Amino acid sequence: MKVFMLNTFCGVKSTGRIATDIAQLLESQGDQCLIGFGAEDAPPEYARFALRVG
């Protein structure tokens, strides 16, 4: 399954951490996931999920 999440943050702040936790869970099940975000920078360990938009 391919999943695209849209959130203000990726890997930082509360909702950004929730999004990366979900992405890691999906990845562990063999799914693909991207997180579109627009505020701050994503930590390097989440670069595989991060897609800056806006």
Image (cartoon, grey):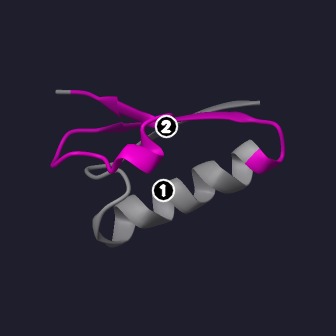
At 37% from the left edge and 59% from the top edge, which residue is drawn? 16
Left or right: 26, with 53 as reference point: right
In the image, farthest residue toward the right: 29
**Is 7 rendered above or below residue 38?**
below
How far apart are labels 1 and 2 at the CA level? 10 Å
Left or right: 12, with 29 as reference point: left
Q: Is residue 23 magenta?
A: no
Left or right: 30, with 32 as reference point: right
Q: Does the magenta stretch include residue 39?
A: yes
Tag 1: amino acid: Ala
Q: Name the residue under label 2.
A: 49
Can you say which quadrant of the picture contains the C terminus?
top left
Could you tell me which secondary element the residue under label 2 belongs to? loop
At 42% from the left edge and 37% from the top edge, which residue is drawn? 47
Q: Which mark is residue 19?
A: 1
Q: Determine crowd level at label 2: few under 14, some 14-19, many 20+ residues with C-alpha closer than 10 A.
A: many
Q: Do the residues labelled 1 and 2 touch (CB within 8 Å)?
A: yes
Q: Position of residue 22 (x, y in %)?
A: 60, 57
Tag 2: amino acid: Phe
Q: Which of 15 and 48 is in front in this view?
A: 48
Could you tell me which secondary element the residue under label 1 belongs to? helix
**Is 30 rendered above or below residue 53?**
below
Q: Where is residue 44 in the image (x, y as percent from the top left)?
A: 37, 45
Q: Where is residue 35 in the image (x, y as percent from the top left)?
A: 44, 39
Task: Give the residues in magenta.
Answer: 28-53
Sequence-wise first label, 1 or 2: 1
Can you say which quadrant of the picture contains the N terminus?
top right
Q: Which of 31 and 44 is in front in this view?
A: 44
Nearest to viewer (mark 1 / mark 2): 2
